[in-house]
Amino acid sequence: MASFYVSAGVSGLFALGTSSEFLTLEDSERFLLGQRAVEVCKGRIPVVAVGNFGSTLEEQAASITRMSEHGVAAVIVATSILPSADDLDGQLLRLAELTTAPLGIYECPVPEHRVLSPQQVRRLAVTGRFVFMKDTCRDMVPFAAKLAFAEGTALKIFQANLRILLLSLEAACHGFCGVVPIVAPELSQQVCDVDGFDADTRQRAYEKLMRMQDVLTAHRYPASAKYMLQRRGPHLTTRCRIVPPESFSQEDREALDRFLQEQNL
């Protein structure tokens, strides 16, 4: 699959996110996936991967170091699996002290949605240790404040929420890191490339992405995304660990086929 995204011209690959069902994997599987993503991409695009596994900060720091040894451009810290729901920025700063790899932040919505405040983002950004953030606050006001606080630092903030993506791009976010780029990276690029495509083209692409996201989430995501990718050519199954095989039905497949035909995708 990594080769598919390289060929599609994406600017980077986020491995071990929510869509990869990373919370259901064994540690050995997680590190293997990070390693394989780097190996397949062969330096053509940067790979980042969630890597803070363990029940204590010390265990998570060791996990981050282990993931970094596979050659990822940055190891992502998922806030939802930090040892505590309190003092998020303090825990992130402690992990920065215990490790040497470039770090990223993912406000992962499961199993508990823990979102950083703009002030916490500023505290992290000025250290120079954090280079990537996947923001999931779903609100333009704090998102714009985070962008302002990170300006002039190494921290690049990406929008995960498609519904406020256009506003986020106007506010000069660094890109889109959401669900639908998994299936339609080319359309996502059209939306994000404000210099390469005219406003009408970008708006049409955005509307297609919105319809696609609604269909994907209505039909047993991430099995629905795997099915759409099958239709695009990559060889993979629709097996998931969070979606029982029997629940992704023939009716789901037919609905996805109709959507693809109607949208001429």
Image (tube, rainbow, N blue to C red):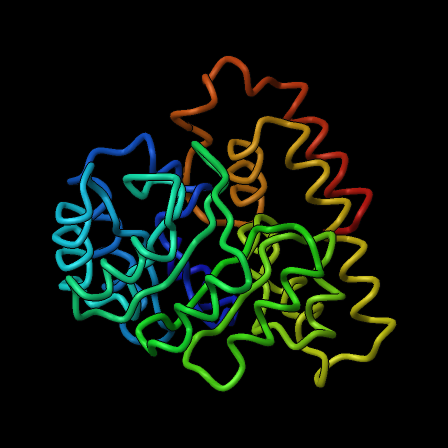
Spot occupied by residue 178 in the image (x, y as percentages of width and height): 57, 53
Which residue lies at the image location 83% right of the left edge and 65% below the top edge?
Answer: 203
Residue under the image location 71 percent in, 85 percent down: 195
Nearer-the-camera pick, 123 or 236: 123
- Vertical arrangement, residue 99 with respect to residue 88, above or below: below
Residue 149, position as x, y percentages in the image: 54, 75
Q: How many labels does the image show?
A: 0
Quadrant for residue 235, please give it.
Answer: top left
Q: Is residue 215 left or right of residue 227?
A: right
In percent of the image, x 54 and y 81: which residue is there? 151
Tell me which corner region of the image, top left, top right, bottom left or bottom right, holds residue 236: top left
Side of 239 relative to 35 (left or right): right
Residue 27, image quadrant: top left
Q: Say which residue appears at 23% left-offset and 64% top-offset.
A: 39
Percent position of residue 134, x then y: 49, 58
Q: Which of 153 and 246 is in front in this view?
A: 153
Query: Going by the image, does 190 lie left or right of 230?
Result: right
Measured as percent of width and height from the top left, residue 77 is found at 33, 54
Q: Which residue lies furthest to the top in this view?
A: 246
Q: Is residue 57 above or below residue 156?
A: above
Q: In the image, is residue 194 above or below residue 89?
A: below
